[in-house]
Image (tube, rainbow, N blue to C red):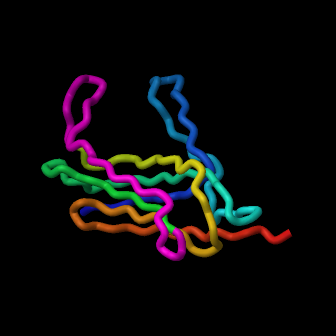
Amino acid sequence: MLKINSFAYCTDIQSTVAQHNSKQIEKLVNIIGEISLVNLPCQYTFALSGSVTGLDPSIKNEITLSFSSPTGDILEHIVSELPTHYETPQNTSLPMTGFNLNLKLPNCVFTEEGVYKTSICFKTGEKFEFPIDVVVIKS
């Protein structure tokens, strides 16, 4: 069964290389529970991260990701076909049953306060939604 095991909004995702095994490591920077802006309209760059498991490697999986405003305006829309197999360092092909989703959304234009949401849909019909409040800091 397809699941999103974790999901977080953050201010950035940094990539580093581990010294002991030379693997690339993704580090979430400043996990956020809301997006706080100084004024509206405003451009704001942020990132999202999640872990997906339960993919069926016998079919072509496709993911559609949308980030939308409280009124339903879509600020970002991404469609991507996922591979069914991946290559190991030993040149072995293994079935792809899960993946980590790390995505930066640069310069999103926010025009209103309220609950925005990320919708993640798969070709198989599963849909997941992750809300985040956008507020303007009153001075």
Q: Position of residue 17 (x, y in %)?
A: 52, 27
Q: Position of residue 80 (x, y in %)?
A: 31, 49
Judged left or right of residue 53, residue 67 is right
In the image, taking residue 103 as reference, residue 43 lies left or right, namely: right
Q: Residue at x 60, y 59 (%)?
A: 109
Q: Toward the viewer: 45 or 43?
A: 43
User: Quadrant location of the C terminus?
Assistant: bottom right
Q: Residue at x 35, y 47 (%)?
A: 99
Give the residue drawn at x 70%, y 63%: 36
Q: Where in the figure is residue 122, as x and y percent of width and height?
A: 28, 60
- Residue 137 falls inside the magenta stretch: no
Q: Which residues are magenta?
A: 69-95
Residue at (51, 53) in percent of width and height: 48
Q: Is 72 within the magenta? A: yes
Residue 54 on image: x %, y %: 26, 56
> Count of labels shown?
0
Q: State the residue in front, 82 or 97.
A: 82
Is residue 58 left or right of 63 when viewed as pictured?
Answer: left
Quadrant containing the N terminus in the rendered view: bottom left
Res. 129 image quadrant: bottom left
- The answer to whether 119 appears left or right of 123 in the picture is right
Tell me if residue 92 comes above or below residue 51 in the rendering. above
Task: State the residue lying farthest toward the right.
Answer: 139
In this view, the residue in front, 30 or 72, is 72
In the image, is residue 103 above or below residue 73?
above
